Image (tube, helix red, strand yellow):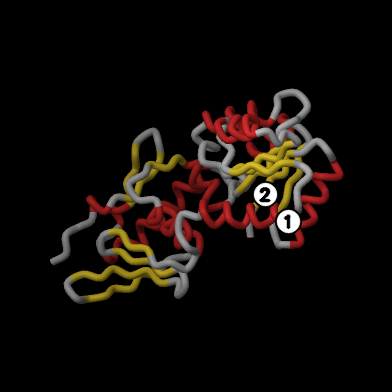
Amino acid sequence: MARILVVEDESAIAELVAINLRHAGHDVTIAGDGEQAQRAIDAVLPDLVVLDWMLPGAGGPALLRQWRQAARTRSLPVIMLTARADETDKVAGLDAGADDYLAKPFSTNELMARIRALLRRRAPEALDAVVQVGELRLDPATHRVTRYADGVEQALRLGPTEFRLLHFLMTHPERVHSRSQLLDRVWGDHVFIEDRTVDVHVKRLRDALAPAGCAQLIETVRGVGYRMSARALTPSG
């Protein structure tokens, strides 16, 4: 399930939300203020944030604007909780970058439904959807990677990490991803994994794609990171 950060200074509310999220199978971290929230995000990028408007120090909207200005957290899904129910406050929260807005007191069932809806909307691809870039095809349901060219299907053998890395790159083609972004999305931003690990697995992925002439699909963008581009695929025949 998802990694969710709950940023709420009222411990009773934070625990209530966390209990419901954990019961639904999510991995939950609680932060009581903006500083704690930033430290949590620096350590592990969550899949979604439940953010209170009123926090000690910098308020929720200021924190959210800060996240929206940073490349790493720009697309982070955020639901804002607030005691402010006026339409002008709702607009202000959405303008700050919130994806959704829920006024206190709220129903935990409604919050859970909104979280489920937001996670579904923000998923780049269905988990079992087949993806294809050029002649390369990946099927998550069967864990198969093949190249189909000139009527011939060639199967490729990938390790589990290389499979996840390829899946992410194929669902985000032509975009350049830094090593830290790949760690976030493929490894879960684990604090003990170094950027160099990405280079090692990219090399292994290229080696696995080489027999089908697909290694050059994974391009190195010097000083930035990696990109998948079908334009570099070797023509069949």
The percent coordinates of residue 51 (x first, y second) are 69, 39
Are the residues tagged 1 and 2 within 8 Å (C-beta)? Answer: yes
Q: Name the residue under label 2.
A: 4
Q: What kind of element bears circle 1?
A: helix
Q: In which quarter of the image is the C terminus?
A: bottom left
**Residue that appears at 40% across and 40% down:** 225
Q: Which residue position is annotated with label 1?
A: 21
Q: Compare residues 46 and 216 and report the one nearer the observer.
A: 46
Is the N terminus in the top left, top right, bottom left or bottom right quadrant?
bottom right
Q: What residue type is labelled 1?
A: Leu
Q: Residue at x 62, y 57 (%)?
A: 116
Which residue is farthest left?
Answer: 237
> Image height check: is 187 above or below 40?
below
Identify the secondary structure beneath mark 2.
strand
Q: How far apart are marks 1 and 2 (CA)?
A: 8 Å
Q: Residue lying at the far right in this picture: please name it.
A: 12
Q: In this view, does 147 lie above or below 191?
A: below
Residue 175 - label: none
- First reached walking from the N terminus: tag 1 or tag 2: 2
**For the residue marked with disc 2, what is the amino acid?**
Ile
Callout 1 crowding tier (Cα within 10 Å): few <14, some 14–19, many ≥20: many
Identify which residue, 104 or 164, lies in the foreground.
Answer: 104
Judging depth in this view, the residue of 165 and 26 nearest the camera is 26
The quarter of the displayed image where residue 153 is located: bottom left
**Residue 78 relative to residue 25: left or right:** left
Residue 64 placement: quadrant: top right
Residue 110: percent from left, percent from top: 70, 54
Image location of residue 34, percent across then percent down: 71, 30
> Badge 2, how many Cα within 10 Å: few under 14, some, many 20+?
many
Query: Seen in the image, is 87 located left or right of residue 142?
Result: right
The residue lying furthest to the top in this view is 57
Tell whether 235 sits left or right of 182. Answer: left
